[in-house]
Amino acid sequence: VRSGSDPTDDLGDFTIENYQRLLRLARAAFQFADFSEIPYGSRFVLWRHDCDISLGRALRMAEIEYGEGIQSTFFVNLHSDYYNPLEISQARIIQKVVGLDHRLGLHFDPLYYEELHGVVGIRELEEHIESERRILEDCFGTDLTAVSFHNPARLISDLGDEKLGGL
């Protein structure tokens, strides 16, 4: 990397090697933080992944990060069209991710409930978030500390609370 240039200009395609370089650049510039202990006032990064399509690819990312000494949060969707986190083969993948010292978060899909029940209010969404949180915590024996929204519904743009459903 040339002096004075943006070090990310030279990353090129998204390869394992370039991902490792990106992690190293981030680690050199920031403190990696967990959603449960955000170090406000310092330079930090919350490294996270929304698991939308492949838990197998998520595991590969987790392995790379583990090799670089980095912890991140993997947000799992109980209603994914591409995987079922409660199916034994997929649950084992999630166990491996957790076994690499990564955290789990809930990748919550509010549209699932809107399509199933019609318009859903904030209170109902919080109940569903809490229910899904408990399922993941019970299945994987780990505390969830954060939620991310998959396909945020119109309702989500009106949210102002820092925490929902205990996350």
Image: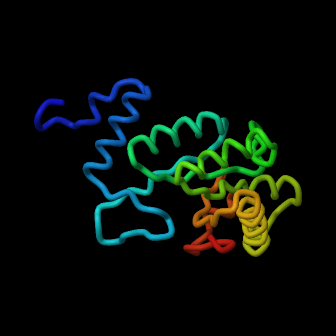
Q: What kind of colouring is applied to the model shown?
A: rainbow
Q: Position of residue 118 (x, y in %)?
A: 86, 59
Screen quadrant of the C terminus: bottom right
Q: Against 50, is 119 above or below?
A: below
Q: Is residue 80 above or below residue 132?
A: above
The image shows residue 9, relative to residue 92, as above or below, that is above
Residue drawn at the location 55% of the way across and 73% of the way down: 162
| Residue placed furthest toward the front | 99
**Residue nearer the viewer, 43 or 89:** 89
Residue displayed at 35% across by 25% down = 12
| Side of 8 where 92 appears, left or right | right
Rendered location of residue 161, percent (x, y): 58, 75
**Figure quadrant of residue 6:** top left
Residue under the point 70% across and 50% down: 77
Near-viewer residue (69 or 129): 69
Q: Nearer the viewer, residue 60 or 1?
A: 60
Give percent across and percent down for residue 119.
Answer: 82, 63
> Number of labelled discs?
0
The residue furthest right is 117
Q: Is residue 117 left or right of residue 160?
A: right
Single out the residue that lies furthest toward the left. 3
Q: Quadrant of residue 32?
A: bottom left
- Left or right? Give the position of 32 relative to 109: left
Quarter of the image that includes the N terminus = top left
Q: In the image, what residue occupies the spot 50% across and 65% down? A: 35
User: Residue 108, percent across and down?
Assistant: 69, 56
